[in-house]
Amino acid sequence: MIAILTTFAKNDRVDLLLLNDTPPVLSFEIIRPNVLIFERDSSLKVNVEQRIMSTYLDWKYYEDRLNQNLLKRILEKGLA
């Protein structure tokens, strides 16, 4: 499959990832630009994108809280 994609793209800088195996941030960054190359089943695409966005937004909430707490601790106590 990667050989077909590199030939099609006329470039060897192609990564092929399975969205089921990627972390939430990477999955979201893959679907965010919404550049569709091929679609066999539009309802499946919608379901996958919905799952990715839901997982990402759940994760993002906790990441933002952790970052806020970390920044607060750094401002209070410094990096030492």
Image (cartoon, rainbow, N blue to C red):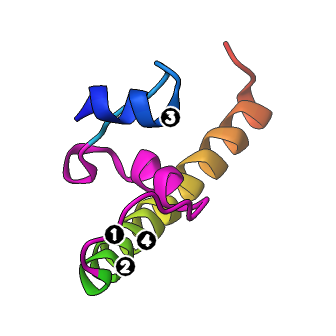
The residues tagged by marks 1 and 3 sit, at their Cα atoms, a distance apart of: 17 Å
The residues tagged by marks 3 and 4 sit, at their Cα atoms, a distance apart of: 27 Å
Measured from the top left, where is residue 51 in percent x and y? 31, 74
Disc 4 packing (10 Å; few <14; some 14–19; many ≥20): some
Find residue 75 and report its image quarter.
top right
Contact check, label 2 and label 4, Cβ < 8 Å: yes
From the image, which quarter does the C terminus lie in?
top right
What secondary structure is found at the residue carrying circle 4? helix
Residue indicated by mark 3: 9
Up-down: is 41 above or below 63? below
Res. 30 mark: none
What secondary structure is found at the residue carrying circle 3? helix
Disc 3 packing (10 Å; few <14; some 14–19; many ≥20): few
Measured from the top left, where is residue 50 in percent x and y? 37, 79
Type of amino acid under label 1: Glu
Disc 1 packing (10 Å; few <14; some 14–19; many ≥20): few
Residue depth check, mark 2 versus mark 3: number of the one nearer the observer? 3
Find residue 34 and report its image quarter.
bottom right
Give the extent of the magenta segment.
Answer: 18-41
Q: Earlier in the sequence, mark 2 or mark 1?
A: 1
The residues tagged by marks 2 and 1 sit, at their Cα atoms, a distance apart of: 16 Å
What secondary structure is found at the residue carrying circle 1? loop
Task: Give the residue displayed 72% in from the left and 28% down from the top.
Answer: 77
Residue indicated by mark 4: 53
Residue indicated by mark 1: 39
